[in-house]
Image: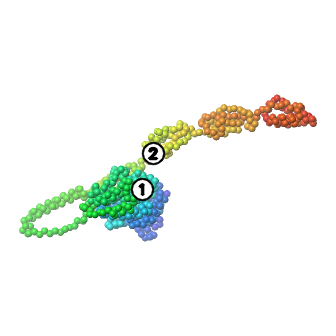
Amino acid sequence: MTTTTGDLTGALVDGRYRLERLIAQGGMADVYEAEDERLDRTVAVKMITAGRADGFDLTAFTHEARTIARLSHPNIVAVFDQGVHEGLPYVVMEYVPGTTLRELLNRRRRLRIEEAVEVCSQLLDGLQAAHDAGLVHRDIKPENILLKNGGRGDRVKVVDFGLAEAVHGDRDTGGPLVATAAYVAPELVGGRPATTASDVYSTAILLYELLTGEVPFDGPDSGAVARRHVEEDVPSPRLTTPDVPEGLAELVTAAAARRPGQRPVDAGAFLRRLQAVDLGHVPGTTGQVPRPTRAVQTTMVVDHPKAKRNWKALVTLGLIAAVLVSVAAAGWWIGIGRYTATPSLLDQTRDTVAAYGLEQGFEIRIEEDYSASVPIGGIVSQDPEVGDRIREGAVITVVVSLGPERFPVPDLAGETEADAREALAAFDAEVTVEHEYSTEFTEPGQVTRTDPPAGEEVKSGTPVTLYVSDGYPPLTVPDVVGLAEADAQAALEAEGLELGEVTRRYSDTIPAGSVIEQTPAADAPAGPGDAVALVVSDGPEPVEVPDVVGMDIEEATEELESLGFTVKTAQIWFTGTVFDQSLDAGSEHPKGAEIWLWAR
């Protein structure tokens, strides 16, 4: 299929959706604000990018979009339509003016406890509607949570239900991991299918971040982070944020249990337990949005003579206060004021990350590495990590994926099976063995070829078939019965066989010089150079001619015919006595030979 690349602003999709403004870009798709000219309303059009269109499962994409479109819930971004525009699949969604939860966290680092609970409650309410419809999100994270009205009494909207699976493959068949490492459920890291409990785990990690301002696990790359989800228990958020109520902290760790069976079974169960938590009085001010400073006018009433006497003291106090304020301001700037939270670059690509980082006020340094879970050009990791303290304008290093590391299949022809397996173990190939005959590699046990063939580059863990020789292919003995001896020999040698012992025998049916029998028989298996014995005809067996002179012609004829001769008669007189025969008595002639009798 043909695909269009670049910014599609201004394009008319399906004759009705006018793309007016590019509002978001990611590794999988671009999102445009668009005008539905048929219904005169603003919508969002998510267009799968050209780089991801190859191998796109349109059937899965259409099924997911139709399933999501049937969902009607205030906390789920509605899907209105889907299709393909110039080779690029797209989906038309509800347009939500506002911001993402990630952008809000970048500004505030963490939410007030009651805000975090409210956001999580609305998220779980929407997720339960999806779970009831048989859908699992698989990628719950702040980037996929929209806040209508930009975080002011907002309505939470969940986006991107299931659409990632249409690009990466069926969620139940393994394939590449479609999830964000910081929030991924342990069972997905192990290659097991996603369930509603997987969404519960990711939501628990999200709630942990809303309460503490950080995710529970970090590491040098996404693979290391994903492994920590498998190997470590999520700690209590109270360890870093003591003002989190005990009951809420216990629910977070229970919902983030490593075993799916130990979590709330689905979003609805999680929501009911969350609503039952007694938040009570939240001590301290950690997590509270600071109240804006306000000017307070104060009036000091003093006795005039005392004021005159104490003006020097007042000036001195004023200078001291000014110095203290300056020192405090400088300390605030050095310690806090010049720092901000590191934004997330993980949803960007090689092509967009530098511009996006500049837009956020940071310099971007790009490094490259192989990744089995992040598509080529996607962002594997960033340093500093999302939410870490960083000076404005500082350098953020991102690792761009080169895709799965590729290895050339070695040339193993002629090697033993054991040596070939050892060579393929270098890139964890999944080896299967097939046997075949070979005229080139005639020693049984030698490798004849591989599939994929030698030299082809494959990723780690790729299935490779070794073809191992069973020796020279078996031959089939040709049918040479009835052929002349010389022709029979030529036919045998053409098949790689040899002429064996030749014996001769009379035959009344096979002409002299032709083959009567062969051993082995026709179509029997044989190996190269095997001999085939032949029995060659000497023609009919010769018969001795009896003396019939003086016999009655009828009796003579009967005797000669019984021996196989062909009798012709000629009678001169009428007595019927044989007086001569054409073949001399005692001579030998083959059966069927013609003999004349004369009688008188």
Residue 294 on image: x %, y %: 22, 67
**Label 2 SS:** loop
Way the structure is coloured: rainbow
Q: Can residue 377 be seen here?
A: no
Q: What's the residue type where badge 2 is placed?
A: Ala
Disc 1 target residue: 194
Please determine whether, in this image, residue 482 is positioned above or below residue 320.
above
Q: What's the residue type where badge 1 is placed?
A: Ala
Residue 308 on image: x %, y %: 7, 66
Q: Can residue 454 be seen here?
A: yes
**Label 1 SS:** loop
249 or 385: nearer the eye?
249
Marks 2 and 1 sit apart, C-alpha to C-alpha, by: 26 Å
Considering every residue shown, the one lying at the far right of the view is 574
Disc 2 target residue: 429
Position of 346 with respect to 543 (left or right) is left
Residue 291 on image: x %, y %: 25, 65
Residue at 40% x, 66% y: name it: 73
Residue at 45% x, 45% y: name it: 429
